[in-house]
Each structure stands twice: as C-alpha cells, then as structure tokens.
Amino acid sequence: MSLAGRRTRLGRGLGLALALGLAVALAWGGLVWARAPVTVRVLMPAPFADATAELVDAFNRGQRNVRLAVTRGPFETESVSDLAISSLLLGDSPYDLLLMDVTWTAKYAAAGWLLPLDDWLGPDALAPLAPGAREGNRIDGRLWRVPLVADMGLLYWRTDLMDEPPRTPAELVAVSRDLQRRGQVRWGYVWQGRQYEGLSCVFLEVLHGFGGTWGPVGPGFGLDSAAATEAATWLRSLIDTGVSPPAVANFAEPEALQSFEAGEAAFLRNWPYAWQELQGSGSRVAGKVGVTTMVAEPGRSPGATQGSWGLSVLAGSRHPAEAVQALQALTGPASQRRLVERWGYTPTLTALFDDPELVAQRPLLPVLRAALEDAVLRPINPGYAQLSDIVQRQLSGVITGDTAPGKAMARAGRASRQLLEASGQRAASGREVTP
Ligand code: GLC
C-alpha cells in the first residue's frame, strides 16, 4: 500500500471519528439542553407562599422538566395586586403564574393579561368543584382562573358562653350586651373595620343580611338602597353601643383574631383559616369556639362573602404548557388535601368535602361546605378595585362617626354609577350556571 493510500485511509478514518465525536457531542448536548428545566415563576401573597412551600418542593423533586419558583409577595390582597399590575404595565412581567384573589379576575381578563384556560383544561375543568367555589372564575364564557382554596366570611362564637349562636343582628347585640354586663367579655363583636378590602367583605355580608345586593341593580349599584343604609347604620351602632371597640376602625383580620383569641370578645368575623389559629397553644379560647354564618334579619338568608385564591396563567408567559402543568399540580387533590390537613385552608374540590377521613380530621368541613352554599360574590367587574375603594371610603366615614350612614351610602351609590359611566364598563356576570 502506498504511503499516499495509507494517508488517505488515515484521513478518512480520522474524519469519520471526528464526525462521530461531533454527532455524540451534539446528541449529548441536545439531551442536556432538553433536560434543563424550564423555570415557571409564580407570585403569591406571603401566607400562601409559606403554606405551599412543601408542595412546591415536592413538585420540583417529582419531575425534571419544570422548576417552580415562588416569589413571596406582600400580605394583603391590594398590595399583591399592585405589585403584579406594576410588573404587567412595564410590559415584561417576570411571572408566568399569579395566585389571584377572586376579585382581580375581571380586571386582569379585560386587560388581556391572562391566558384563557379552556383549551388547556377542557370545558369541564370546574365540574369537580363545590358549587360556591366555581363562581368568579369564568367570565364572558372563558375560564381564567382555577381556585386553589375556597374562602368565605364566617361568624365565630364562644361555645362556653352560649348554647346557640345568634341568628339575627338584634340577637347578636342582645347576647353581646348581656355578656358584657355580666363581665364575661370586654367586647361583644370584633370585625374588620379598617379602610381596606376586608371592610368591603364585612359590609357585603351585613348588606345581604338586611336584604340588599351590591351590584348592577338600580342606579346606585345597590348602595343607594334602604338595606345599604340599614347595614351601615348597624355597623356604626355596634361601636356607639360599645358592643364593638372603637379600635375596630383599625382592625384587619389579624387584629380582630388577636382580640378574640385573647378571650376579649364573644364574636369574631373572619375567614376559615382563623379556626386553626384559635385552637393553637397561644389561644385562650381553644376548644371553646363554634363557627356559623353571619347574622341576617328575620326572613333573610345569611350571606358569606366569597373569598378564594386561585391560579391564573399570564398571557405573556413564555412557558404556558409548563405553567399549566404547575397550575394543575398545585390545584389538584393531593395539594389541596395537604393545605387542608396542615394549614386548615378550605378545599374547593367536592371529593375532599366528601372524604370521610379528611372530615374526621377536620370536623369543620361540613360547616364550611354549607357556608360555601351561602356564598355571595363581590361585584364581578373590571373596575372592582375602584368600586370597593368607594365603599370602603364611605363606610370608613360612617365607622369613625364622621358621616351619617344614609348620606355615605347615597354618595357611594352616586360615585359608583359615575365610575361605571365614565369608564363605559358593564358588569360581567361571572356566575356559574349550576343545574
Ligand atoms: C381573604 C379572601 C379575599 C379577600 C381578603 C380581604 O384573603 O380570600 O377574597 O379579598 O381576605 O382581606
């Protein structure tokens, strides 16, 4: 064999080896590339970032394609929404998923910030949910949000001080005053009276109990009604008569809870999460607390303001498939069960309310389910944050004694109408049609 021939063969051999090496390297690189997980970022209010930490860890350990990264937002609904909105307005939000309060959905959907979920989750995505928990997720026929936990306003009462909870506003006042007179409690009823979203939630329940509605009924959005004035008058009278401390004007959920937990009051308005706290070692009322729905005038049905937090995918997400995968894992039965067992949150899935083992662990579940059936929604409207702000402002004037209830409610009605007219908005229904 000539030298030239050997060189050629050598050359060919080398070329082949190189090509092979390159192919292996490319394939390996491709594999490594395919394996690099996609990061899905989610913004949550602080309490939910804490409560879901172990679920997020389990999700991240359970598969290699997606890494879920949680940003721990502020505590209160308005502040979390402000944070989310400022990132959305800047045009390039770092988030793929948002844990959203039920009241944000209409605005975010109208602004085009959310991905409709129907194509990803199918038409029956809400079918496994308890009826009250289905509300407020589908707007204008499209699904924007899947709830992770349900929430509803409840009346907590002291089982060591009475046999039955009061059913009417007058009964609540009578029982409170009697207990106060006998020196058994300092205050009758503690609730959220600060000028923030919690006050709108309190008001809606009382308004409902007086037979009123907050929403597109009549020219003043339901606020220029006799029922609205009666509701505001009742809240103010609680302070005037000393049933509620003047400090309720500065109470959000934690302050009201603290007062009741210290044994200061006979009644508390709060969400289901409070139950677990009230049974804790720091509580003076552990084992002495009952739960029911808010009082209502005779012949009226009680209302429980529907809260709830749910996941939505942002329209700008670069990884919608992975974001939907994470959404399904976090809102699925195993996650919800853990949130119930460990943190005392309320599930949204009917199967969990029906689960005998879970009900044995959490005897409150049937009460919560019944309260969910009494759920009343805050207006489903893209301008909800402003509508709520109007109500909070006017009520705050009533609570501090600066404005007469009738005047405040007439103003709230006028301002709501002007707001809706000026923005050309209409009220969306958001209500699930349940057979
Ligand atoms: C709870 C409710 C939410 C409500 C908020 C008001 O988080 O789930 O819907 O807006 O309380 O403080």
Image (cartoon, grey):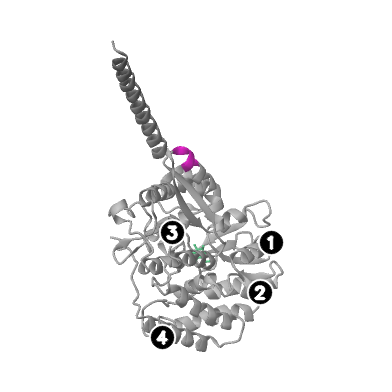
* Residue at which label 3 appears: 370
Q: In which quarter of the image is the N terminus?
A: top left
Residue 241 in percent (x, y) is at 64, 80
> SS at mark 3?
helix
Going by the numbered disc 1, the residue's amino acid type is Ala
The residue lying toward the viewer, choosing from 109 and 417, is 109
Q: Does the residue labelled 2 lie within 8 Å of ligand 1?
A: no
Q: Dot 3, crowdedness within 10 Å: few (<14), some or many (≥20)? A: some
- The disc, 2 or 3, on the residue closer to the chain's N-terminal end is 2
Q: Is residue 298 visible?
A: no
Q: Dot 2, crowdedness within 10 Å: few (<14), some or many (≥20)? A: some
Figure check: 358 above or below 152 = above
Residue at the far right in the pictured view: 183
User: Mark 2 and mark 1: span between their CA atoms?
Assistant: 15 Å
Residue 261 in percent (x, y) is at 65, 60
Decide: marks 2, 3 in contact (CB < 8 A)? no
What number is the disc on residue 262? 1
The residue lying toward the viewer, choosing from 354 and 38, is 38
Point out the frontmost of discs 3 and 4: 4
Q: Is residue 271 left or right of residue 225?
A: right
* Residue at which label 4 appears: 418
* Residue at which label 2 appears: 247
